[in-house]
Amino acid sequence: MKDRRVLIQSLVAACVAVSVLAQATPLAARSSGHEVWAIDQSDSVVDGGGRLYVYKGSSLGGRNAGLAVPEVVDFGGDARTTCLEATTTAPRRPHMLFFSPSQSHAIVSFVATGHVLFLDALTRDAVGCVDVGLQAHAAVPTPDGSAVLVSNQNGKLLQRINTEYETNTFTLDAAATIDLAACTTPSGAACQDPVLRPDNAPICPVIDATGRRAFVTLRGGGMLVVDPTATPMRIVAEYDQATVHPNGCGGVETAGKMYINSGGGTPANPLESDLYSFQLDEFSPVSSPPNTPAPSLAFSHDERGFVDSHGATVTRRGRYVWLSDRAANQLVVVDSRTDRVVKKLDLVGNLSSDPAPDLLDVSPAGRRVYVSLRGTQPLTANVPGVDNAVGATPGVGVVRVSRSRAGGTLQAIAPISNLVNGAEQADVHALRVRRL
């Protein structure tokens, strides 16, 4: 294990936190069930790299979850050094987090730079770093563990990193790249088109269980479905902005369908909340005509005004799809059997006047849904004056799921703090459950 120092933060009294330097929690002391990883993307005290918070799953049960003490890793330390050695440049603003299929590695994308960082999930050590260029918004592993798809947002590229986790070998495969601003779809249309798809900055690639389809959402609306195994990667289905609205990032597969949302967070489209479902068996193995197969619209909440859909997860063995709405401060639950909304969970209450729920994941037993809660100074996806992503209580929200798995209650908040000159700067975004 590389030498490193980590911060252990004692979380007390509402949202006040005091940080102390300490050694990492011994491996034997960690939870045998699951861990919850959350990332504060605000600049860290070491060197602007942000911080990772790792909670034992057992510490987040019950109403005392707000007192849970996480292991804290500063990305300005070992991670920054690893990236400098591998790429000659330093990463900034860790934004999204995924785990390899075996849960052995964590994959962190940095949205203010093009870095994709690989961590040994057990030791938390940085073991690899790749710079894809302008901006790595999300880096998502394929189900077989052979690759990671990267949405290079402002570069308007979909890129592939080939991965060998056993040897910690991570290589950008330049031949696989799709230039989403300059490519052509199977129908012969321009991928980026002022009418069809006006702004092809990729937001999130959502990969189905076969690994043969990646649903790539776009900032300006529309969507491209890509075969990530081809070299170069190949578009197999295309959707325009009238069919799939902008800024989708929440996506889950269940009940033979792929669910994809649309959201806000950009000056051109600050507020949006829609959910689409696509029947996976209706896709052609080769290519489909435009807007085929047509999605079903599970909901559109745009008429409600102040809405911004973002994260997604599933409960009850995939029956219920949960979506976060960071502007409306709600979790929306959809029954995958009917594609109808069955519950809207309002998170505003005694624990938080403005929780701003962002990304979601579920505990292995399905009894808790964990939610990243944004801060008063959101660094990404917030439109000034609209304040769609502004929250009052940055941290990890713990939702106790009802027996039906179709509802729940915000039970506790594990606060995360980054005080700079007395002002709270913490902005929690990435969140994932690591199954042990």
Image (spheres, rainbow, N blue to C red):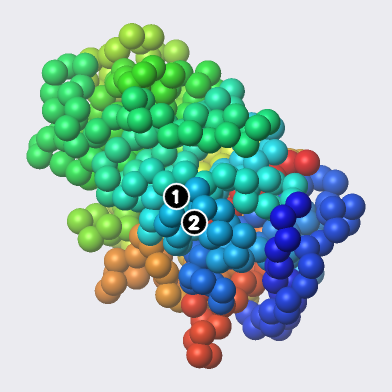
- Farthest-out residue, left: 194
Q: Is residue 308 visible?
A: no
- Which numbered circle lies on residue 87? 1
Of helix, strand and loop, which one carries label 2?
A: helix
Viewer-closest of 161 and 207: 161
Q: CA distance from mark 2 to mark 1?
A: 5 Å
Quadrant of res 105: top right
Q: Residue at x 40, y 67 (%)?
A: 379
User: Which quadrant would the C terminus be assigned to in this image?
Assistant: top right
Lateral position of residue 100 relative to residue 236, left or right? right
Q: Position of residue 30 (x, y in %)?
A: 83, 54
Marks 2 and 1 close (CB-CB < 8 Å): yes
Q: Residue at x 15, y 41 (%)?
A: 198
Q: Measuring from the top left, give residue 286's x and y in whole percent.
A: 33, 9
Q: Is residue 69 left or right of residue 181?
A: right
Q: In this orientation, which residue lies closer to the viewer: 149 or 213?
A: 149
Query: Would you name the residue on which mark 2 appears?
Result: 84
In percent of width and height, residue 132 lies at: 38, 43
Query: Element under label 1?
Result: helix
Question: Could you tell me the amino acid type at mark 1?
Answer: Thr
| Residue type at numbered disc 2 | Leu
| CA neighbours of label 2 inside 10 A, class few (<14), some (14 to 19), many (20+) | some
Q: Above or below — where is 158 with respect to 49? A: above
Q: Which residue is drawn at the image coordinates 27% and 49% (left, top)?
A: 154
Question: Is residue 383 visible to us here?
Answer: yes
Location of residue 431 in the rendering, given as x and y in whole percent from the top left corner: 58, 53
Judge whether 356 appears above or below 275 on screen.
below
